[in-house]
Image (cartoon, rainbow, N blue to C red):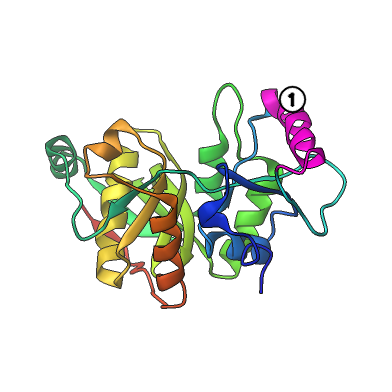
Amino acid sequence: MSLFDELDVARAPRELVAVGGVIDPPTLRAAYRNGVFPWPASEPDAAAHDKALRKLVRKGQVPLLPGTPDGPLVPWVSPHPRAVLLTGRFTVPKSVRQLARRMPWTTTVDAAFDEVVERCADRSGGTWITGAMSRGYRALHAEGGAHSLEVWDGTRLVGGLYGVLSGRIFSGESMFFLESGASKVAVVDLCHRLAEAGVPVLDTQQESDHLLAMGQVLASRLEYVDTVRALRDQPATIPAERRTL
């Protein structure tokens, strides 16, 4: 039984369900298998955020994971409600269809995982993709648990996303674009590939305008966690060949 199996994630009193531990493949796998993911504060807010987390621990309001090392605490969250895309029912907006017809882009899976993570972390004003986050997901990718989808203009990477596959649930973590619309194309292409692989749910964590236009729906935390636990032990393989839009 994992650290997160022992927590009642679905009925936790707040979205923050635990703090501490380390961001490594075993912990990440256990977290996603229970509908949980790490969400550190961006660097300008990290010190104040850590102080607030430690106060919650001292008051007994949030559990501290065993084996927590010295240093900033890792926050582990499970949003309520949870925003998801159903891969068999999503909508491709007209603007994305027109963009796909107009641009000579191609897509791949797991062709440039490290670069996708690096691009996702390259944000003005700070990023929650800390060095520990980057190392943890890269290590998980090396074990086959994390995946990227890339959008290419020739040999130039113009957009992409990465996330974690837990059985037949894919949890999107972050996306980026260097050309307008490339991240939207990445989501559409991923939905097609997931549907082909028999993965019915793409976890998008929180609402966003462009994902709402694709049919993003909200589920209660209890519904989402129940779904994850029903699908997490059913293996799936995402098609990885290069595709033309």
Q: Residue at x 21, y 37 (%)?
A: 213
150 or 76, nearer to the observer: 76
Residue most toward the bottom? Answer: 234
| Residue 123 in view in this figure | yes
Residue at 75%, 33% (x, y): give it. 50
Determine which residue is flagged by label 1: 48
Q: Is residue 92 left or right of residue 57?
A: left
Say left or right for 28 vs 237: right
Could you say where residue 222 lies in the image, as x and y percent from the top left? 43, 56
Taking 128 as reference, is 86 above or below it?
Answer: below
Residue drawn at the location 53% of the way across and 53% of the way down: 11
Residue 26 in magenta? no
**Residue 167 visible to an observer of this rendering:** no
Rendered position, 232 above or below 110:
below
**Residue 74: x percent and y percent?**
71, 45
Query: Callout 1, which amino acid?
Result: Ala
- Residue 209, picture quadrant: top left
Question: If the image is split into quadrants, where does the N terminus sit?
Answer: bottom right
Q: Position of residue 116 (x, y in %)?
A: 50, 47
Q: Is-magenta flag for residue 60?
A: yes
Residue 167 appears at what percent x and percent y? 44, 72
Secondary element type, mark 1: helix
Q: Identify the residue shown where x is 39% and y is 69%.
A: 168
**Crowdedness near tag 1: few (<14), some (14–19) or many (≥20) residues, C-alpha within 10 Å:** few
What secondary structure do most residues of the magenta stretch adopt? helix
Q: Nearer the viewer, residue 36 or 193?
A: 36
Magenta extent: 44-61
